[in-house]
Structure formats: C-alpha cells, structure tokens
Image (cartoon, helix red, strand yellow):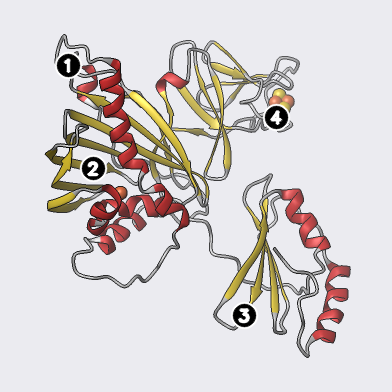
Amino acid sequence: MLVRGDPLDDGERAHERMVTAVQSSWRPLQRGAKPHHSMCPHLPLVLVSLVKIDDEAAQCVVYRHLNHKQSEWLDSHSQWEAGRKHAYHSGMQETLVREAAAPTKFAKGWYLVSWSTDLEPAGVKPLRYFGKNYVLFRGEDGTATLLDAHCPHLGAHLGYGGRVEGNDIICPFHAWRFGASGRCTEVPYASRIPPRAAVKAYQVQEHSGMILAYFGPEGSEPDYEIPHIEEMSSPAWTPLQQAHIEIATHPREVIENIADLAHFMPVHKTLIDDFKVIIDGPRATQRSIGRGHNLKGEPIPVASVATYHGPAVQFTHLQWAYDMVLINAHIPVEENKLLLRFGVILKAGEGVTLPPAVLEAHVAAARNGYFEDVAIWENKRWRDQPIFADGDGPIAEVRKWYTSFYADSTAP
Ligand code: FES
Ligand SMILES: [Fe+2]
C-alpha cells in the first residue's frame, strides 16, 4: 500500500509546489485517452501511471522510484473509477511524463475459450479474457460464435441477458440483432440499420470437445491449425473428462515448463531418462521417457509426447498406467491471471467399462500432475535473465519460440 506522508527529502517544498500545480491542471482521464503518467522529478519519487486497459477499465499503478533504474511497486487498482479516484486523492507529486508504459503482451494464436459441453444449444456466455469482454453463443444451427461483448448502440453487454434467435444474438437493451459476422442485421424500431453498426467477430473452430478462437492483431490470420484428437471418435477411449483452475501467473511461465527438465523430480517426482524438445514452426514438442509410479505405488515407465500447437493449446500422448491423451490449454484472463483447462481421455479398450473409481483416480492423478506446478508459478518471480546450469533443459529456446507469437498490439 502507498504510505501517505512518506518522508520526503530536500525536494519536499518543490514537491508541494508541484502537487498544487499538477492538481490544478489534472484532468480526469477520458475514455479512449492514451496512457497517462505522472511523476515527481525529485527523489524519493512517486510515480503514478494510469494505464488504459480497455474502454471501461484503467489501471492505476503507483510506484516509488528508488533510483534511476529501479522502482518499487506500491499499489494498484484495476477499475476505471477506482484508478481515476486514486489519482485524484492520493496527493501525488505529479507532473506529466511522455513515455508510455511497456504494453501488455499476449501471444497471438488459437485459444480454448470454452469446452463444447459448457455451451448448450442457443446458449449465451459472457467471457472475459485478455482483460476484455466477449460474448460466446451457440446459434440454433449449432455453430458457436464469439463477438466483442458490448453493443455498438448504447453499450449493453450482449452476454448478460442477450438471447439467441436463429443464428443471431439479440441485445438485451433495445433488441438490436447481430449475426455471426458481428454485423447488425436488424434494429426493430428503425427504418434503416446504421451502416457502422457491428461488433468485432472472431474466428472460431469447434472440434475435439473444444471451442477454439483465434486472437491476433487486427488483420492477422491464423497460419496453423489445431489438429483433431482422433482418439475421441474411437469407442476404445473414455469420454472427455474436464477440469479447470485459475492461476495467478503469466502464460510464459506455463509454457517454459515444457523445457524445464530439472523440475521433474522435485515437483513431479518423475525421473527422466530421455528428454528432448523439438521446435518446428508454431509447434513445440517435448518428448520424454522416464520412470514414475502407478496408483499402487509400483514403479512403471512413463513416456510422453507433449506438443504445443501454437502458444496456448497442448496435447499430450501419455503412456502410463493407461494410454491417455491430455489437453492442457490456458488463456489469459488479465495480464497476470490465466485460466488453465485440463482435459483427459483414457484408453480403457473397446467394450470395457472402467469402474468409475478407477477412472476417476487415474484422471485425478493426471490432472494433479498438471496442477503440481501451480504453487510454484503463483509465487515465483519472472527472471528475464536467469542463471542457467547445464541440465536445465532448453528454456531459452522455448522462450524465444514463445515470444515469436507476440504481436505489436497491446492486446490481441
Ligand atoms: S445497447 Fe444494444 S440495442 Fe441498445
Ligand atoms: Fe511441470
């Protein structure tokens, strides 16, 4: 928290003069304004950044500047109003500075936005990813559509009270109708549809139990596909079991796990005998052969081939107590919060029904393997320039691969 009345140095009087000058010239940040920064030129400096997140939210970040290179994070508010009030009332020693904060970076690519079973026919779901709001709905023909959430008319959120008619969604506020392309197709009380009445629509694909959407900078097109999981259509495999967890971390932490050879024993209690990471365009595959245990505690071999198809959707073919296919997909909710979805199918054999307890125990073991890293991720600090030792695995290569998905825009 910001401590009011932090001891000021000799520049105190200058600070006060500046406070008066800046407070009298300070204007509320207008919607659509560029990031707004205030900084005192005297040490100890306090810097306030109002960073626009989207049309509704601004983040007010308060730092204490320690020296020319370092600053200490003190406080932040992520709501527009809260951010604005904070800047007004915290008595900051402010003057405007020109540089913008480093933009929030997200990787462009296909993301899993919902399990198929979570969106029923004619269903409507509000979603929040990448710090923005979306609406996902299923038309009566079964097609899933993802649109920006807010109606271009007066801004209602289509995901709260919007309803599906045919393959369109009807805004809950004044009943404007939008098709899967995002274009307004009807204004029920008007003689003509305003030509610019549209919301942004995203490319969506649905297969293998997943609704996938492509996020990228304006005008960018996907240059890879997420493959179908063929095993799902075989009667020898169990139906998809699903789980999810929200994690306070950045996706890059999740990604570099695939190259982190040295964490397998301490975190997953698995001894790895053979380990390789193969990067091929938009795909990064980890192949490993190791030794683990079955649920009776007996040592058994474990072999896995885990491929990221783009930056956020990974399929693992695992040979353990059973053959399994695992889905591990994450999507940022905000910059340092993501939703990780986990899915698993298991090869019981054609005509074999596993006792539910056996199935559940194996699903839980596979799921927990993914969730074992969470406590580390949530509490670790990102090191841009870590000190590596031999035996660490090709973490630097995987970082480079992941950053190739970064786009210039602040949010895809
Ligand atoms: S706000 Fe959507 S129709 Fe008016
Ligand atoms: Fe891990």
Q: Label 1: which residue?
A: 236
Q: Amino acid at mark 1?
A: Ala
On screen, 46 above or below 117? Answer: below
Q: Earlier in the sequence, mark 4 or mark 2?
A: 4
Marks 4 & 1, CB-CB < 8 Å contact: no
For the N terminus, give its image quadrant: bottom right
Q: Label 3: which residue?
A: 66
Marks 3 & 1, CB-CB < 8 Å contact: no
* Viewer-side label of 4, 1: 1
Question: Residue 168 is drawn in which quadrant?
Answer: top right
Q: Secondary structure at mark 4?
A: loop
Q: How far apart are the two marked residues, 4 and 1, measured between alpha carbons?
A: 47 Å
Residue 313 makes an appearance in the image: no
Q: Give the residue furthest to the bottom.
A: 10
- Cβ(mark 2) to ligand 2 < 8 Å? no
Q: What numbered label is drawn on residue 156?
A: 4
In front: 292, or 15? 292
